[in-house]
Image: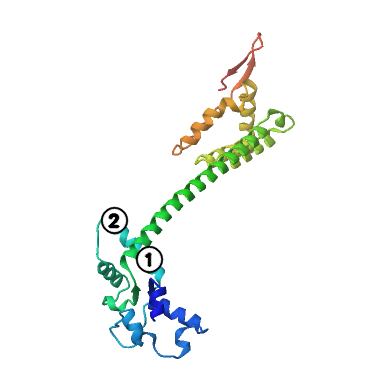
Amino acid sequence: MQIFKEVFNLCTLHDLGQLLAKFLKVDTYEDAHIGPLDEHPDVKRIFNYKPTKRHQPIPAITSADIVNSYLEFQDLNRGRQFPYEKFLDNLVEKYKLKKREELGIYCKSFPYLTEVTTKMSREYTLYKRRADADVRQQMISLFQTKLWEIKQEVENELELSAYATKSPVAVIDHLSSIVEKYLTVPEQKNILDIMIKIRNDELLRCLLNVSIYLGTIDKPDKFITDLQKLYQSQGASLGRQNVALPSVSTSRDGDHHLKSTK
């Protein structure tokens, strides 16, 4: 046990049992049948282990648990000095024991434990900052690449030449697929429902054809502003309006005019 004290700075009875089992090449310390670990005089002295009851199970506390608990305890008491015993009392409460002597902990130096955990905390903070920065940069690069790909796809799909040989129904189907793939806003379902309604309603298809015939077709760079506004209005719902089918008349000068039908 003298060698143990020279080698280890922090250890628990649970750790010691696992180390001895590994050294003796058995699954657990009990499988070695060399007597209760917690009743060995040197073990009881070094670990200051005094269970409340005889044959009381050794708490399943590891050195890693102690370090993590101490880091948490330091955070709770940041900027304040506290005695080692106060931390032990915190462990007693955490593991629902009755006294410190039931913990089964060997710590060679409390200041050393403080130094190690403080350094670990500092190194972890620096590592986390670097990792967060790397992940953020990777996400930005990924989003930029994906945005460029989507932009290219949308521009290609909105080329007017692609619609020259399509029927009105095929055009609506194609536009519906674009809405479904790229227009990921709360209003997406409403827009798809409207497009499906137009596709299935001959009267609405005629009205759409008339509006295209009388108007102009905006290129993507002209309606992109409206599209951005649509993305920003997350809470707005898409309203529907009832429309009357107009008739078309041509004047002598060749201009098209709408005439209401009654």
Relative depth, front residue between 120 and 159: 120
Q: Looking at the image, is 8 positioned above or below residue 74?
A: below
**Residue behind mark 1:** 67
Relative depth, front residue between 186 and 66: 66
Whole-Å distance between the Cαs marked 2 and 1?
Answer: 16 Å
Is residue 240 shown to the viewer in this render?
A: no
> On the rendered image, what quadrant is the N terminus found in?
bottom left
Q: Which quadrant holds residue 224?
A: top right
- Dot 1 falls on a residue whose secondary structure is helix
Q: Residues within 10 Å of mark 2 (few under 14, many from 20)?
A: few
Q: Which quadrant holds residue 198?
A: top right
Give, as a three-letter code, the residue at label 1.
Val
Task: Name the side, left or right, on which 6 lies relative to 169.
Answer: left
x and y, in percent, of residue 214 in the image: 62, 20
Residue at figure coordinates x 26%, y 54% from the top left: 79
Is residue 149 shown to the viewer in this render?
A: yes
Q: Which quadrant holds residue 114?
A: bottom left
Residue at figure coordinates x 50%, y 45% from the top left: 136
> On the rendered image, what quadrant is the C terminus found in?
top right
**Residue behind mark 2:** 78
Give, as a three-letter code, the residue at label 2.
Arg
x and y, in percent, of residue 65 in the image: 39, 69
- Lower position in the chain sequence, tag 2 or tag 1: 1
Farthest residue toward the right? 165
x and y, in percent, of residue 133 in the image: 48, 46
Task: Name the side, left or right, on which 257 lies relative to 132.
Answer: right
- Dot 2 falls on a residue whose secondary structure is loop
